[in-house]
Image (cartoon, helix red, strand yellow):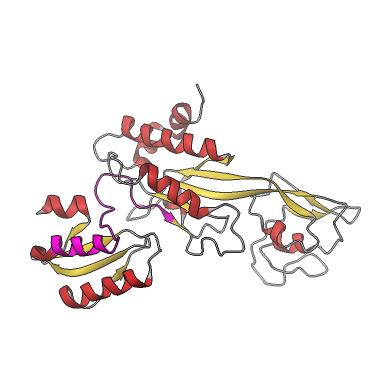
């Protein structure tokens, strides 16, 4: 019974005769599928469903002897249960994929490609992946084993600039500054990668720029554009009882490099994990430079 529960998405409850059915969705479900899950919850559970932190749905209080029947019903509605055990878990993506005005990469496409290639693949223990469309990091990439953040590297076309300074305001987190250049909101976080030069034109300090793309989307005359679009890569994050932020291992890479690093990270995890170590513990034991030596350096 335990084997069925933990390897298939049929989860144990402390009430041993009951199970919880986990349906990995990453935040997307049709109205017809919602109706089916509601019907199952009413008929076989206690009329409730749960939303998980990774944007999936669980139906609790399903009697164990009914769990396989419920699984078949969910499959008929194109809802597979799973995302458990020692494997690559459900990929998490931004909730507003395809609609967010700040999105600088095609999150839906990346989500689907990673899911098709890696979801459910065997790993020493759980391996969690997250894709965020921009530096807002809505999908919490910094507390995943492998986090991806969309990046847009800005460049100014001075011939189009009308000195409106909306880019400067956007770089200060959208907080409008006073005449003295001080944010109007006390305690506001400012980045100030974009400042005003002696000639009155905006200047970008690329050492401070995080490639968030806000200046690009907030430039009325279109003087700011994305010189290139790519991905920031973060590895070794974890939530739970001992949370830890991931390491930034690549500030800006291409799509080809993204998949090379992801593939290499999974293989690194399989090779060097001892027992059921999470990736964060492997990196703590061997060091981030050991990881970079094996994964980031090309042959």
Instruction: Tell me what residue is drawn at x 54 percent, y 61 percent.
Output: 98
Q: Which residues are magenta?
A: 67-92
Q: Residue furthest front?
A: 76
Instruction: Tell me what residue is drawn at x 24 percent, y 36 percent.
Output: 275
Quadrant position of residue 72? bottom left
Q: Please tell me which residue lies in front, 31 or 299.
A: 31
Residue 3 lies left or right of residue 299; in this view the side is left
Q: Please tell me which residue lies in front, 158 or 205.
A: 158
**In the image, is residue 214 part of the stretch drawn in magenta?**
no
Q: Residue furthest top?
A: 299
Residue 44 lies left or right of residue 151; in this view the side is left
Q: Relative to 94, is 48 above or below?
A: below
Q: Please tell me which residue lies in front, 271 or 119.
A: 119
Instruction: Tell me what residue is drawn at x 59 percent, y 58 percent.
Output: 103
Residue 137 lies left or right of residue 18; in this view the side is right
Q: Relative to 88, is 27 above or below?
A: below
Residue 115: image x %, image y %?
39, 48
Q: Relative to 17, is 109 above or below?
A: above
């Amino acid at each position: 019974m335990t084997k069925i529960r933990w390897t298939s998405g049929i989860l144990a409850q402390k009430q041993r005769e009951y199970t919880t059915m986990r349906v990995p969705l990453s935040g997307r479900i049709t109205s017809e599928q919602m109706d089916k899950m509601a019907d199952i919850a009413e008929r076989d559970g206690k009329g409730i469903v749960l939303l998980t932190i990774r944007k999936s749905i669980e139906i609790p209080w399903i009697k164990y002897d009914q769990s396989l029947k419920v699984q078949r019903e969910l499959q008929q509605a194109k809802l597979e249960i799973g995302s458990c055990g020692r494997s690559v878990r459900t990929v998490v993506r931004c909730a507003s994929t395809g609609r967010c005005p700040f999105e600088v990469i095609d999150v839906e496409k990346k989500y689907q490609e990673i899911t098709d290639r890696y979801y459910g693949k065997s790993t020493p223990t759980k391996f969690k992946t997250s894709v965020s469309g921009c530096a807002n990091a809505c999908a919490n990439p910094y507390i995943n084993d492998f986090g991806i953040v969309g990046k847009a590297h800005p460049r100014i076309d001075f011939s189009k600039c009308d000195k409106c300074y909306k880019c400067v305001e956007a770089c200060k987190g959208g907080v409008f500054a006073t005449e003295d250049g001080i944010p109007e909101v006390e305690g506001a976080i400012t980045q100030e990668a974009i400042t005003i030069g002696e000639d009155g034109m905006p200047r970008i300090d690329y050492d401070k720029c995080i490639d968030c793309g806000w200046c690009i989307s907030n430039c009325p005359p279109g003087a700011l554009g994305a010189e290139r679009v790519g991905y920031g890569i973060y590895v070794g994050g974890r939530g739970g009882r001992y949370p830890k932020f991931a390491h930034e291992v690549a500030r800006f890479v291409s799509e080809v490099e993204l998949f090379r690093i992801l593939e290499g990270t999974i293989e690194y995890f399989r090779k060097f994990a001892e027992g059921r170590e999470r990736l964060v513990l492997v990196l703590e034991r061997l060091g981030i430079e050991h990881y970079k030596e094996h994964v980031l350096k090309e042959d």
